[in-house]
Image: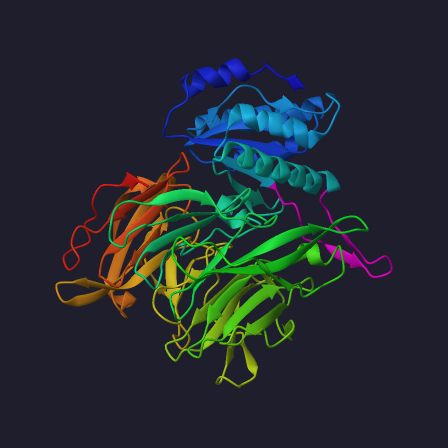
Amino acid sequence: MARRTDGDSVRKAQAGGAARDDLQSVAVIAATPRDAALLVSAEVAGAEISVICVGEGGKEDRAVLDRALDGAVRRGCRAVGSPVFLRGEGGDSREALVRELRELRPSWVRLTDPDPERVTYDPETGIPVHDEPPRLAAAALDALAAARTHQLESGVPVFVDCRRAAADEKLGAASASRYPRTANWLTEGFDGRLSAFLPSAAGVVRWFQPEAGRPEWQGPELLPGPRLMPGLSVVRDLHGFVHLLALRRTARKDGGDDVEIVHAAQYGTGRPLTPWHSLGSPNPGDRYKSREVGFPAAGFDRAGNFFVFVRNFGHSVSYRRQAPDGVWTTPWQHLRGQRVADDLVAVTTPQGEVELLARTRESGAVVRWYRSGPDGDWTEDRNVPFSPRPGSMAAGPEPGTVLFRDLLTNEPGIWWPGAPAPVPLGGSEGEGPLGGAPGVEVDGWAYTLLVRGGPGGMGVVGAYAEGRPDQGVWWNEAGASSPLTAAALRARTGMVTLASLTAGAQLAIAHRESRTGGFEFGSWYTA
């Protein structure tokens, strides 16, 4: 196993010596130094970076990585040691990766895309054609397996971000994620107790309150499950039960892997999940097509029907429906229309109907699908008046609304069907999706609370008069920075809770100081 020393002493001096508690411990794992350099270049201030390369690459490749690390240090990161090169040691690269992760003990791992999109498709061979060399996906899959093994051994969560190589670097790391960053990951059960769910290398991790309204939390605990990819959709049904959706990877007997959509539910806070149930794939039985499936979005209508949507291999939308009695009533159905990217968001309107919004693949605009009623056909609407930054759309806190960041300005905005234009919300700093909570009372008036990432990952909280975002939003720092967007929830008791993840990957909680007064929050504490 080779380690390089040139350039390392310079980076250590610039970084200021010993590691600091306020830095993220990040392991960048890639096939070659040049591939690693792309991931390093996306890191913002506050990262403590270690680099592991499966292959050593050439002299120029290593120089590119050195320049990327030096640039990261100038941005406020810390480079730990020198890059490690595994090729040449012999043996299994996954085993070598596990040994490195045991030594580094990172909380965060950055990888390239394990299932990159094709640029074209050869119908004669049935094989997609990619403009990225196969080594990138192979290295990412080895690193995912190693991170899973390390987490299972250590019992400490490891959070993974897989980044598309072809993404626009100017839009930020959140816009390059293969698996969308989980929004609205803090939920309330029917018993009033809160739970937080996040995806990790080894599966879903959960924190929960043993007693409603109390500051104590239990977790993180790894929920049993199959080999999931590092993404998660969290949806609450009409009864307060929590539903989780993810992608599962399974090995095929004839070689390669299948990727399918899976679903599990929590029917009681702190209780075990149901077994993960496979919903299959819109492109079943094809080892190449199933691997390119997008990430699922889902929602419940007023009758209790559960709709799951996903981008299929052809870049159209497919969906399945589960009836209120729990029976999946349809196989995967195809919604014809615009070709879409991975950004799918399901919202439930004030009338209780589920609608889908998706960012189009070619233009970056948004297309919407809706029904005229419970038994109506799906209709496509191409007149949605905004273009979002990739990875920024999320269901808004008020029924039927969608939050996003503008593609050109990065300013957050909100839109709902029927509105002639989106409402800008102010505050163009930060990246990633927004979240929020409706029905927050202040002096007898109802407000909607918003949360977003701000400068340097600092959490920012805003509020507007419920139903009137056009009257303006008042933004204030939340007092905690995080690699992920904070989550907000108003419990049935009126208590408002913010949840965040620290640089050290611990759950941090803050509560609103008054249940009817202003928007001041108490001190953050780790759960």
Q: Nearer the viewer, residue 510 or 82?
A: 510
Q: Quadrant of residue 477?
A: top left
Look at the image and tell me whether residue 53 can be seen.
no
Q: Residue at x 65, y 45 (%)?
A: 114
Q: Residue furthest right?
A: 124
Q: Give the main secondary structure of the magenta stretch.
A: loop
Look at the image and tell me whether residue 298 can be seen.
yes
Q: Residue at x 22, y 61 (%)?
A: 494
- Where does the image place residue 434, in percent across and percent down from the top left? 39, 55
Q: Residue furthest front?
A: 271
* Magenta-colored stretch includes residue 252: no
Q: Is 59 situated above or below 136? A: above
Which of the image's four quarters has the C terminus? Answer: top left
- Where does the image place residue 8, in percent across and percent down from the top left? 54, 16
* Magenta-colored stretch includes residue 124: yes
Q: How is the image coloured?
A: rainbow
Q: Is 303 situated above or below 107? A: below
Q: Nearer the viewer, residue 2 or 200?
A: 200
- Where does the image place residue 236, in percent across and percent down from the top left? 42, 64
Q: Nearer the viewer, residue 287 or 162?
A: 287
- Where does the image place residue 99, in percent across and percent down from the top left? 61, 25
Q: Quadrant of residue 399?
A: bottom left
Residue 126 is left or right of residue 37, and the answer is right
Residue 408 is left or right of residue 123, and the answer is left
Q: How many marks?
A: 0
Residue 94 is left or right of residue 73, and the answer is right
Q: Is 57 situated above or below 438? A: above
Which of the image's four quarters has the N terminus? Answer: top right
The boundaries of the magenta stretch are 112-132
